[in-house]
Amino acid sequence: MYIEDGSSYGYFERKKKRGLYSWGWLGDTVPEDKLGWTDAELKQKVIERLNSFSGNTADENCCRVDLYCGFDTCALCSKQGYSILEGNWPDRACFCGSLRLEHNSKVYVSPWNVQHYIEAHDYKPSDEVIDAIFNGRPQTWAERDKIALEKAHEEIMKDLKREREEEKRREAARPQWLKDYEKESAAKIKELRKNKAFVRM
Ligand SMILES: [Zn+2]
C-alpha cells in the first residue's frame, strides 16, 4: 500500500481530508529524500517511542486503530528475499491497522508497525512527523471505534430518511382510484367482521 508522505488522502479517506497527514505508507520503495539517518540516537528514540504504544486491543489504551483495514506484509522485505514460508520473516514486518497521532490540529496517520520501516529499511520520516511522534497524542482504539460507530449511525439515519422519502414518493404516485378501492375494501371487511361474517377455523 503506497501513499505519498504528507498526503491528505488516507487509507480510508478516499477524498482529501483537511488536517490529515499520511506517512510511512511506503510500498516497495523508500523515497530517496527519506532514506538514512544522521542521528542514530534519535532514530533509536523514535523507534522506542513507537514501540511504547500499546497494540493490544484488550488494553483500554490500545493505539492500534482501523483494524478492519486488512493485512499487509512488507514489500521491501519480500524484495530482499525474506519469506514467510521459509520462516525467516522479520518481526513487525506485517501491518494491520494504523496509528493516528493528533498533534497541532492535525492527524498523522501511518500503518501500525511503521517502525519496522525505520528500523529495518532506514526510513526517516520528516521532522514534522518526528515532532508528532514525540509530542502527539495517539487516538485510542475505543475513541476511534466510537468515531467509526457514530459515522455508521449517521449513514444509517441518512439511508432511513432516503427510504422514507422514497416511500412517500411512491405513495403519492399511486392512482387515486386504487387508494379509494383499498379504503372501501378495508371498510367492507371491518363491517363484515362486526357482523361476525367470518368464522374462525
Ligand atoms: Zn521490511
Image (spheres, rainbow, N blue to C red):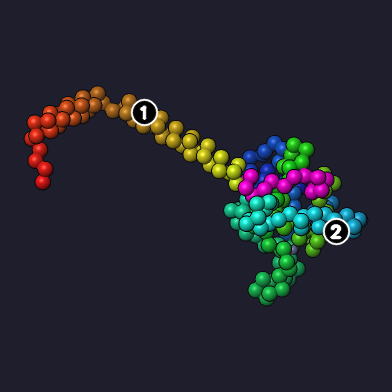
Q: Quadrant of residue 188?
A: top left
Residue type at mark 1: give it.
Answer: Lys
Q: How crowded is mark 1: few (under 14 residues within 10 Å), some or many (20 or more)?
A: few
Image vertical order of residue 153 relative to residue 4, above or below: above
Location of residue 196 in the rendering, given as x and y in whole percent from the top left corner: 9, 34
| The residue positioned farthest toward the right in the image shown | 38
Residue span colored magenta: 131-144
From the image, which quarter does the N terminus lie in? bottom right
Q: In terms of secondary structure, what is the magenta stretch mainly?
A: helix
* Quadrant of the image where one finds ligand 1: bottom right
Decide if ligand 1 comes within 8 Å of the CB at mark 1. Answer: no
Residue type at mark 2: give it.
Answer: Gln
Please tell me the numbered disc located at residue 168. Answer: 1
Image vertical order of residue 87 relative to residue 135, above or below: below
Image vertical order of residue 149 relative to residue 79, above or below: above
Q: Which of marks 2 and 1 is in front?
A: 2
Q: Is residue 40 visible in the rendered structure shown here?
A: yes
Q: Is residue 126 visible in the rendered structure shown here?
A: no
Q: Quadrant of residue 108?
A: top right
Residue that badge 2 annotates: 44
Location of residue 131 in the rendering, given as x and y in whole percent from the top left corner: 83, 45
Q: In which quarter of the image is residue 83?
A: bottom right
